[in-house]
Amino acid sequence: MLHVRETLEAYQKNDPAARSKLEILLLYNGVHSILCYRISHWLWRYHFYFLARLISQLAKWLTGIEIHPAATIGRRLVIDHGTGIVIGATTVVGDDCLIYQGVTLGGTGVMQGKRHPTLGNNVMVGSGAKVLGPIFIGNNSRVASNAVVLKDVPDNSTVVGVPGRVVRINGEKTDQVHIPDPVAKELQLLQDRIEKLENMLKEK
């Protein structure tokens, strides 16, 4: 249930400062928050809601990381530094993800149902980034520090800025300057149609 060994191995892989599994287990607040989440999530699944929330709030107080027990988090998540992270109730995080401090995986309103993001596998979210709403961040994608992402991101992409925009897909730069504007395209079609109708009226 806790997957302690593979979590510690994931931290060793992603943090060059980590010297031993014992050090990680005892001193890393990200590990403490993940282990507390695993327990609280198990309780939440079996409808021990108050106890689940109590554990998650104690973990928030101890680690500075808030993970709602209803969230769904895959295996080998690494939370690096971690302070200030918020992960909402309907968030889904895939396997082998890496999340840095100050990240919010949050909602954009008070609607019912799915209102938080879904991260695919092997997604990195940089420090201070905000990923908001029921959007999908594709597998192997990277969200840059302080980006604010409000729309879906394809697999193997890099997204930066406020609001977030995709600047790389499969390692290739996207042509941000020459991406067609769909609104401008529709307006041009309307203009062409009006001119055609005006010409038809003149001919009559």
Image (spheres, grey):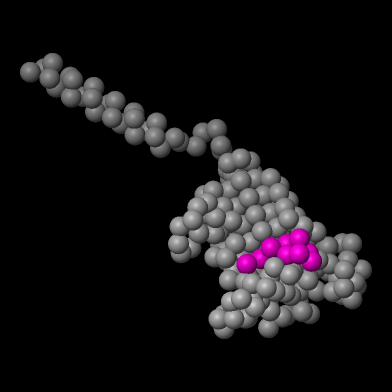
Q: Give coordinates of residue 179: x percent, y percent.
A: 50, 37
Q: Residue at x 76, y 60 (%)?
A: 64
Q: Residue at x 61, y 46 (%)?
A: 148
**Among the 4 quarters of the image, the one containing residue 85:** bottom right
Residue that extends furthest to the left in the rendered view of this protein:
204
Q: Is residue 9 above or below residue 135?
A: below
**Among the 4 quarters of the image, the one containing residue 82:** bottom right
Would residue 188 be visible to someone looking at this image?
Answer: yes
Q: Give coordinates of residue 146: x percent, y percent.
A: 69, 45
Q: Give coordinates of residue 76: x percent, y percent.
A: 71, 72
- The mark total stands at 0
Side of 192 relative to 21 (left or right)? left
Q: Nearer the viewer, residue 169 or 11?
A: 11
Side of 183 relative to 179 (left or right)? left
Work out which quarter of the rendered image holds the N terminus and state it.
Answer: bottom right
Q: Is residue 115 above or below residue 12?
A: above
Q: Residue at x 54, y 48 (%)?
A: 150
Residue 200 in the magenta stretch? The answer is: no
Would residue 172 be visible to someone looking at this image?
Answer: no
Q: Residue at x 14, y 22 (%)?
A: 200
Q: Is residue 191 above or below residue 150?
A: above
Work out which quarter of the rendered image holds the C terminus and state it.
Answer: top left
Q: Nearer the viewer, residue 199 or 164?
A: 164
User: Which residues, given as a range, are shown in magenta?
Assistant: 60-68
Residue that extends furthest to the top in the rendered view of this protein:
202
Q: Nearer the viewer, residue 165 or 34?
A: 34
Side of 166 relative to 204 (left or right)? right
Q: Give coordinates of residue 52: x percent, y percent.
A: 64, 76
